[in-house]
Image (cartoon, rainbow, N blue to C red):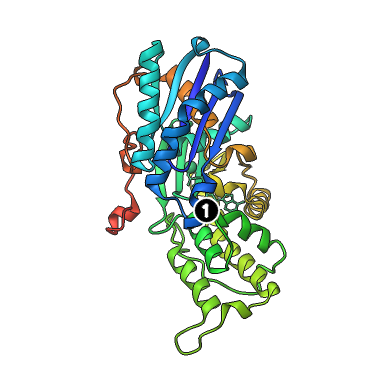
Amino acid sequence: MLTLGIETSCDETSAAVVEGERRILSNIVASQFDLHARYGGVVPELACRRHVEVISQTAESVLDEAGVALGDVGLISVVKGPGLIGALLVGVSFGKALARAVDIPIIGVNHVEAHLYSAVMSNEGIGFPAIGLVVSGGHTMLFLMEDFGGYRWLGGTVDDAVGEAGDKVATVLGLPYLGGPLVEKLAAAGNPSAIEFPRAMMRRRSYDFSYAGLKTAVLYHVKGYAGSPRDPSLIDDAERADIAAGYQAAAFEPLVKKTMWAAEEFAAQSAVVCGGVSRNEALRAMFADAATESGVPVFFPARELCTDNAAMVAGLGAWRAARFPEESSTDFDAFPNFGAFDSLDGYRDPRARRGRKK
Ligand code: KG4
Ligand code: ZN
């Protein structure tokens, strides 16, 4: 069976055709990079308008590229949340309209679960129970997966997501949008131990994360303190590289340590690390070392499936529809917050607990 996936949760309009549960026939990601770059971040209203403009064409092109007709598609899978509500509504409305017009079943899936599924699509032999870490621009979350599809919430960020922190550190370092990958490039020439930035919430067995303090520490390092201000333009290239490398080390160490602590506590057979930040080679190398040391293999999605894409959405939709046929229904709404993912055992959004939920 062929599944048409649709993803519009943030700033990428994406459509994909997947055969079965994992064979990608085509995957188009129409980036809105040009639209948001001048503002230094995603502008929700502009994102929604661009989704409206390009969604039909993107879906048409992806069918062409796969060499299939709409009539060959057996299921539409669309992200229903979490994400920007206006942006989600474009994909959800488009998907439902298409499903009704051509009489194809539709399923609404969770964006974070789709990130976890991207690792399943890319790898054979992920052993369960597994620890799942999602690290992206909007999310930093740790799960125990008894099996794929059954999740227990272990922890998440109490403030910024790690991808978001990297993008803000990039701005402090004078790098353009989209900063995370540029910080990675800069860091490659730096010494990660030259500047010791704080590692947050490292109390053993806490699976929550925090990035606001680290971001502020980098800001003060670059701009100085009230009593001793610095002119950031005088920081030489070698120190900028050390700052980037020191930031990455401090940002990534809690991710690696807590994933491996969880693997030990729950006797996990493997760990999967996914989301935009999982593209980062320094992070992959730290996890590779931890895997060797602990004997717990760590799996990543293929690089093109780390950031937002509809292939993981199509794959997850096919996977869920085969196991939970009652989920193939137009009876779902778009939702902005992760908390609406109610099939998750033990979930409490730490940002909500602290009254800081976004
Ligand atoms: O998964 P994604 O496309 O969107 C969300 O669901 O948020 O992740 C985007 C995030 C951005 O913060 C971006 O800077 C970050 O992933 N990112 C990276 C790298 N590639 C993307 N961060 C660090 N190193 C990278 N190579
Ligand atoms: Zn994402």
- Say which residue appears at 64% left-offset and 52% top-offset: 290
In the image, residue 52 lies at what x, y percent? 41, 33
In the image, residue 106 lies at what x, y percent? 39, 19
Up-down: is 266 above or below 66? below
- Say which residue appears at 52% left-offset and 10% top-offset: 72
Location of residue 104 (image quadrant): top left
- Residue beneath label 1, please? 37
In the image, residue 141 lies at what x, y percent? 45, 48
In the picture, measured across the screen, residue 262 lies left or right of residue 329, that is right
Label 1 sits on a secondary structure element that is: helix
In the image, residue 311 lies at what x, y percent? 54, 29
Q: How many labels does the image show?
A: 1
Mark 1 crowdedness (10 Å alpha carbons): few <14, some 14-19, many ≥20: some
Q: Nearer the viewer, residue 70 or 307?
A: 70
**As shown in the figure, which amino acid type bears the numbered disc 1?**
Ala
Instruction: Work out whether residue 346 can be spotted.
Output: no
- Say which residue appears at 62% left-offset and 58% top-offset: 182
